[in-house]
């Protein structure tokens, strides 16, 4: 199986390193044993925060200055985060006052006794001010609010305006969204782009966010049954159509060729080869668009698509989706809960701070009131003057939290690998499905998989 499919299956997990501002080299700001490295305030350490991302460094500096306190931010590498932090949370030894979680394990951790019920601080009074799916994902099954998030991460298709104008006669996001509103329309666009000498996406994994369809169902239902819908099964056919018709450049996600495709023609089927020396031979091709969540704009495109800045726009695909996100809460055994809550309140609910935060980072906030104010009349030069905040807020409202389960990322990876094996010709569709079911059963014995 080629790396393009392996990386497509790892999309949700790998991308979080970029989205959440991880330092990228595996080093922690503090050590993984919870020992204090100190902060910038006076005296001893007042709060300890554990996270897998350095994105809290700025709000911490603001909070320290406001309150004259000292916060120790201990960053544990993403790959070690769960295994390092869980024992501390369960034993209380070396546990922080505040800790974060990403969507991969959020829905498991809120059911444990790790986080304090934030209902004690009457946060439910804020609920109407937030994107529903973000708010509800922090709630445990017994109704307690355990974790909050300051961001929402809906996705879309980012595309090149100049290519759209040439091929479709318009670069308008609404018109392109109409074209992309069904999988059939997306494939039709792929054919039109191919006829003009372009590729629709870098790789086939770019359609994976849309395979739940317009009538999505959770991967696992309330009776622990794996739900395999016809729309999920269609992923096999659409991925095969992309491959057979060469609608993609076979540039694996996060490879040098994937990043290079944002700026220039790339070598077709370069795989993981270095593409710094791309030439103008018949083996090169130019890519039209890429599927990314909202954080892909500031953390991927604006940092890597420097040569094509101003030539981009974002629009919808066949269905709404989100990718990633960071939730935060107070450790149940913390002796500094009130101060910890003051920090969380600033991070997720302080209008002055959040307005400054969104202006600095370009993050899309979960606080809808602030986002509505910030987005009024907003134009992003990188996107040719488009107001992407309005787009992402509308997409966020389409996401139903009841469809999200704690198994999603692992199952997405497994299913992506099965589809990849089929497209590569290693397995037929039935064999790929049976391999997928066997892998699910092995990883999650409690899930009931379909039986022949």
Image: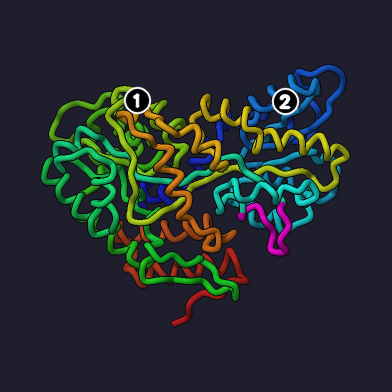
Q: Residue furthest left?
A: 195
Distance of label 2 from label 1 (alpha carbons): 31 Å
Looking at the picture, how far across and down is residue 436, in whole percent? 46, 66
The circle drawn on residue 381 is 1
- Left or right position of 63 against 154: right
Question: How many numbered markers are drawn?
Answer: 2
Residue drawn at x 34%, y 48% is: 316
Residue drawn at x 32%, y 25% is: 309
Looking at the picture, how far across and down is residue 355, in whole percent? 57, 29
Residue drawn at x 64%, y 38% is: 348
Does residue 395 appear in this view?
Answer: yes
Bounds of the magenta segment: 136-145
The circle drawn on residue 63 is 2
Q: Quadrant of the C terminus?
A: bottom left
- Circle 1 SS class: helix
- Left or right position of 99 against 260: right
Q: Is 231 in front, or is 390?
A: 390
- Circle 2 SS class: helix
Q: Is 393 in front, or is 419?
A: 393
* The image quarter in which residue 54 lies: top right
- Image position of 273 with respect to 418: above or below: above
Q: Is 85 in front, or is 322?
A: 322
Asked if the residues shown at circle 2 and circle 1 are in contact, with their CB atoms under 8 angstroms apart, the answer is: no
The circle drawn on residue 322 is none
């Amino acid at each position: 199986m080629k790396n393009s499919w392996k990386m497509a299956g790892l999309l949700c997990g790998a991308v979080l390193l970029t989205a959440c501002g991880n330092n990228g080299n595996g080093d922690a700001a503090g050590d993984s044993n919870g020992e204090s490295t100190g902060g910038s305030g006076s005296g001893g350490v007042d709060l300890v925060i554990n996270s897998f991302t350095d994105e809290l460094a700025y709000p911490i500096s603001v909070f320290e200055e406001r309150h004259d306190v000292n916060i120790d931010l201990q960053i544990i590498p993403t790959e070690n985060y769960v295994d390092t932090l869980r024992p501390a949370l369960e034993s209380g030894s070396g546990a922080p006052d505040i800790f974060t979680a990403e969507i991969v394990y959020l829905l498991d951790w809120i059911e444990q006794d790790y986080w304090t019920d934030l209902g004690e601080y009457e946060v439910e009074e804020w609920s109407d001010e937030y994107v529903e799916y973000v708010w509800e994902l922090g709630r445990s099954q017994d109704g307690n609010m355990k974790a909050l998030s300051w961001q929402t991460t809906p996705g879309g298709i980012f595309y090149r305006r100049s290519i759209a104008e040439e091929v479709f006669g318009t670069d308008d996001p609404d018109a392109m969204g109409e074209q992309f509103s069904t999988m059939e329309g997306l494939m039709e666009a792929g054919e039109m782009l191919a006829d003009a000498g372009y590729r629709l996406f870098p790789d086939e994994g770019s359609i994976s966010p849309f395979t739940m369809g317009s009538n999505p169902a959770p991967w696992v239902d309330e009776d622990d049954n794996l739900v395999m819908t016809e729309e999920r099964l269609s992923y096999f056919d659409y991925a095969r159509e992309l491959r057979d018709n060469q609608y993609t450049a076979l540039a694996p996600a996060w490879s040098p060729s994937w990043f290079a495709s944002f700026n220039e023609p790339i070598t077709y089927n370069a795989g993981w080869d270095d593409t710094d020396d791309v030439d103008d031979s018949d083996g090169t091709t130019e890519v039209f668009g890429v599927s990314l969540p909202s954080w892909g704009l500031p953390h991927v495109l604006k940092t890597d698509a420097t040569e094509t800045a101003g030539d981009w726009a974002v629009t919808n695909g066949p269905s709404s989706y989100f990718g990633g996100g960071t939730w935060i809460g107070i450790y149940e055994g913390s002796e500094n809960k009130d101060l910890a809550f003051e920090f969380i309140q600033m991070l997720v609910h302080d209008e002055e701070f959040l307005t400054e935060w969104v202006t600095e980072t370009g993050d899309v906030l979960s606080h809808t009131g602030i986002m509505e104010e910030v987005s009024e009349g907003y134009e992003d030069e990188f996107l040719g003057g488009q107001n992407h905040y309005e787009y992402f807020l509308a997409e966020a409202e389409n996401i139903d939290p009841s469809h999200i389960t704690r198994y999603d990322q692992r199952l997405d990876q497994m299913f992506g690998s099965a589809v990849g094996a089929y497209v590569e010709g290693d397995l037929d569709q039935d064999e790929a499905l049976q391999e997928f079911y066997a892998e699910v059963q092995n990883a999650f014995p409690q899930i009931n998989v379909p039986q022949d």
